[in-house]
Image (spheres, rainbow, N blue to C red):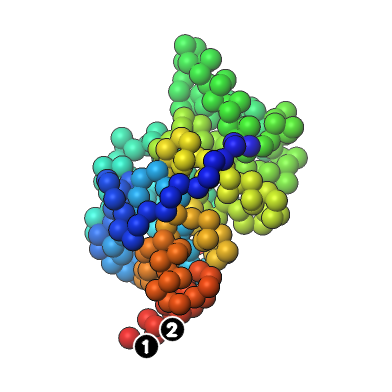
Amino acid sequence: MMNSKAPAPPVAGEATGSPAVRARGLTVTRGPRTVLRGLDFSVPAGRVTGLLGPSGCGKSTLMRALVGTQAKVSGTLDVLGHPAGSAALRSRIGYVTQAPSVYSDLTVRQNLEYFAAVLEPGRSAAGRRRAQVTRAIEDVDLGSHADSLAGHLSGGQRGRVSLAVALLGSPELLVLDEPTVGLDPVLRRELWHLFRGLATERGATVLISSHVMDEAERCDRLLLLREGHLLAEDTPEALREQTGSTTVEEAFLHLVDRAATH
Ligand SMILES: Nc1ncnc2c1ncn2[C@@H]1O[C@H](COP(=O)(O)OP(=O)(O)OP(=O)(O)O)[C@@H](O)[C@H]1O
């Protein structure tokens, strides 16, 4: 697991510099439903941003829009300076869905070697690929299972293989859909150290969804989503302060009540 240093100082209320993601009027329909409704937000570069909200509020849909796999997206959505879904972004984004996508009949290392070869084929890149694979296995702390078949791993371990795949090629933007769901507290803490380290040591932008509000406290910045609307976009501290709350969960509930009375 990566050694993480102290968290980067939180960004102030307004993000500075060029954001990694910028959305204006982002609207997504799925079937007959409008799932995201005119969202305006940005995701600062080199920071850990949490996308928080209850189940079904549209977190996965927003992530799919960012990585370019969602149909019926309107409004403006720029990612690393390009419209979301541009071919130029493919190797610059790592995406982990909720369903681990690994080959059960390959070992952990073979899975990573396969995906590394897809990313960077050719004999001349073999040395680089080996180094990337070894680092990714270490990052997710699966060294002792490197030669186990993925099909013999637990759900949480398979999830970590998916995460390792996303880390190959050192993407500038990591989009992680509920990566800590179902994991024990020790592993959850280790993964949060990894996410923090990816931002502070490797300069990556990390966007993580979760419906567990205590994870929000670990983020530099939060996007609070409810029923396809953005309730708030700020640092955890600012959200607590604005609402006179002691936790982000309390702040979230406060904002829900406030929205209901307007
Ligand atoms: N294929 C689909 N057709 C129509 N509606 C859909 C489809 N897929 C998802 N939805 C709806 O879109 C909404 C947002 O779903 P989404 O998966 O983005 O939520 P989420 O916040 O990621 O939820 P969870 O935390 O449970 O994963 C939900 O209300 C869901 O019912």
In the rendering, which numbered label is found on residue 237?
Answer: none
One can see residue 40 in this view:
yes
Q: Position of residue 149 (x, y in %)?
A: 72, 34
In the image, residue 236 sits, relative to residue 174, either above or below, namely below
Q: Is residue 164 above or below residue 29?
A: above
Q: Please indicate whether residue 162 sits to the left or right of residue 254 in the image.
A: right
Going by the numbered disc 2, the residue's amino acid type is: Asp
The disc placed on residue 261 is 1
Dot 2: few (<14), some (14–19), or many (≥20) neighbours within 10 Å? Answer: few
User: Tag count in the figure?
Assistant: 2
Residue sitting nearer the eye, 100 or 71: 100
**Alpha carbon distance from label 1 to label 2:** 6 Å
The residue drawn where x is 66% and y is 43% is 158
Decide which of 60, 3 is in the foreground and name it. Answer: 3
Q: Quadrant of the N terminus?
A: top right
User: Looking at the picture, how far across and down is residue 216, in whole percent?
Assistant: 51, 61
Identify the mark at residue 257; answer none if there is no mark. Answer: 2
